[in-house]
Image: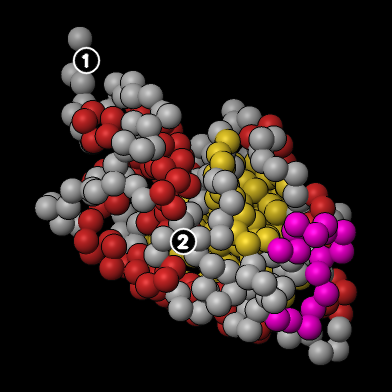
Amino acid sequence: MPESKPSLLSLADIEATRRPFVEARPMPGPPYRDPRIFSAEIETLFLKMWLCVGHQSGLSSPGDYLMREVGAESVIVLRGDDGTIRAFHNVCRHRGTRLLDDAVGTVPACISCPYHSWAYGLDGKLLTAPLMDEVEGFDKTDYALGPVRCETWNGFIFISFDPDAAALTECLAGLPDFSRFGMERLGLGATHEYEIAANWKLVCENYGECYHCPTNHPQLNPVSHFRSGGDSFEGDYFCGGPMRLNDGCVTMTVTGQTTRDPIEGLGPDDLRLVHYFNIYPAFLLSLHPDYVLTHTIWPVAADRSVIRCEWLFTPRAIARSDFDPSDAVDFWHVTNEQDWAICERAQKGVQSRSYRPGRYQSLEKTIYFFDNWYLRSMETALSGNCNGNNG
């Protein structure tokens, strides 16, 4: 009989979080600090689920690419000459050399390996391989770049390393209908990248509640009160809910004002709300009346994450001669920096073996949804025998 592996998290700790909300406790320290759990997350979540890599407007021309890293895997996502967006492993088919290094860029007609100059077309096919005509039986058609599944949803590009994963549209079918925001028509107005000393789950949890807002975000309350949230709700692949703008405010900027028009087609309710959703595992989608903000979180280590933010605006707003996204970008950059500081402080705290979780506050229902999704998804990797009920 094979030896069973020791549990990475005790059944008592798992069951404490999986109790009904009014009785439940947040997760304990190990999921935020244990490198064994981190490795299991990469294999179980990030290499199995659909991951958002960015918005299609960031790949406007043939040869434009994004490069993303997940654990030991590296992926190139690029637009081909035919306009199609494809994804490939960032690995030369000759002897495995990494092809591209920059997170964003443009290649001309081909991707050339820096080692032996094997060159690949924008469709991934091998174009040239110097001197390989001297190798008997060598056929270029056998050595295209390894494909990675790539699909789009509302203008956002997703990849999956799992050939057996359900289709993206099936996974996201339970989400509210956001088609009225016309996200596939929006354009990239600004980007920002952060590297922080905190576990990726702390970032997701921080995003899911405003209990911390009065203490950490003094600029937020005058625009959207921390208790203005509507009902939080969840699906198999997401959790989230709306928050209301204060009277006299039209969007999330320092002043609550902007010269931009709202996104065309939004109804009266959407003009008073900001919708915040976490699409699992780590795509944070914030829909404002006049722009959309996203955070994609990329785990680097148990205590380190890279976060990429994109601000998306209507083509009409971007086309204006006086287009200036800084009112929205500056507001959220300040907010982000405040969030990263408190997440890094939380990381230092959960590193301690003395940490014992308290209780969820009523404003933390979305964190409860996230934590329970995480424990369900990681059940086998963490203990192999979690049978607690959610409620």
Toward the viewer: 94 or 137?
A: 94
Q: Which residue is mark 2?
A: 210
Residue 229: in magenta span: no
Secondary element at image label 2: loop
Tag 2 or tag 1, which sits nearer the N-term?
A: 1
Camera-side residue: 302 or 322?
A: 322
Q: Looking at the image, which residue is at 67% across and 72% down? A: 247
Badge 1 element: loop
- Kind of residue indicated by mark 1: Pro
Give the tally of numbered discs. 2
Is residue 47 something that shows in the picture? yes
Q: Which mark is residue 337?
A: none
Percent x, y of residue 360: 34, 47
Per the image, the residue denoted by label 1 is 2
Q: Is residue 165 above or below residue 84?
A: above
Residue 123 image position (x, y, % from top left): 75, 51
Q: Few, some or many C-alpha atoms within 10 Å of disc 2 (few <14, some 14-19, many ≥20)?
A: many
| Three-letter code for the amino acid on which mark 2 is drawn | Cys
